[in-house]
Image: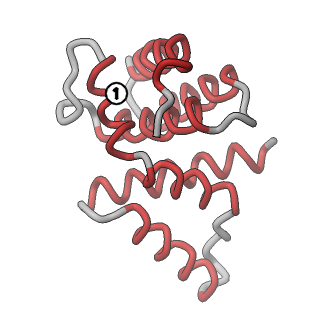
Amino acid sequence: MAARNTARKRAFQILFEGDQRGADVLTVLADWVRHSRSDTRQPPVSEYTMELVEGYAERAQRIDELIAQYSVDWTLDRMPVVDRNILRLGAYELIWVDETPDAVVLDEMVQLAKEFSTDDSPAFVNGLLGRLKDLKSSLRRD
């Protein structure tokens, strides 16, 4: 499953870049795909990375509403940009991607937080995504 791990990391990086640049994530995704096809030094963008980014983009407003509603003492704007985008990706995969076990999503997002964010972030990410997991059946609406 190393390929899925890499796909999640790239999807996170695309969401992060879009957030930092104030750009649409689908535009950033298209840029990544174009660069990977025109420059052999750039890694390819996997099908699963595209699915994750496109799925997030389709439900971005709902995902942000859920994160804002269930985060304790943190508004979306106050969250570190890394954490915000890990949570966005994790919320999408957790709630709308049935093929991925919930425990895998939580573990992968905690690992991203360990790699890219602060010492407190893994617990924050795990706690919030754990809450969404517990409420998953009532949260899933398109």
> How far across and how far down the image is residue 142, in percent?
46, 40
According to the picture, the residue beneath numbered tag 1 turns out to be 67
* Nearer the observer, 67 or 18: 67
Q: Tell me what residue is drawn at x 63 percent, y 29 percent.
A: 105
Which quadrant holds the N terminus?
top right
The amino acid pointed to by label 1 is Ile
The answer to whether residue 6 is left or right of residue 60 is right
User: Quick check: 129 above or below 142?
Assistant: above
Residue furthest out toward the right = 1
Q: Position of residue 65 (x, y in %)?
A: 30, 32
Count of marks overlaid on the render: 1
Task: Name the side, left or right, on which 94 lies relative to 135.
Answer: right
| Other-residue count near label 1 (Cα within 10 Å), few / some / many at <14 / 14–19 / ≥20 | many
Choose between 29 and 133: the one closer to the eye. 133
Which residue is more in the foreground, 13 or 54? Answer: 54
Instruction: Indicate the position of residue 104 as horizontal and vertical percent values.
Output: 69, 26
Q: What residue is rendered at 63% in x and 24% in y?
A: 107
Residue 108 at what x, y percent from top left? 62, 31
Q: Is residue 47 above or below residue 61?
A: below
**Residue visible at 64% across and 66% down in the picture:** 45
Residue drawn at point x = 54 percent, y = 82 percent: 34
Element at badge 1?
helix
Horizontal relation, residue 9 to residue 58: left or right = right
> Based on the displayed image, in which of its 4 quarters is residue 93 positioned?
top right
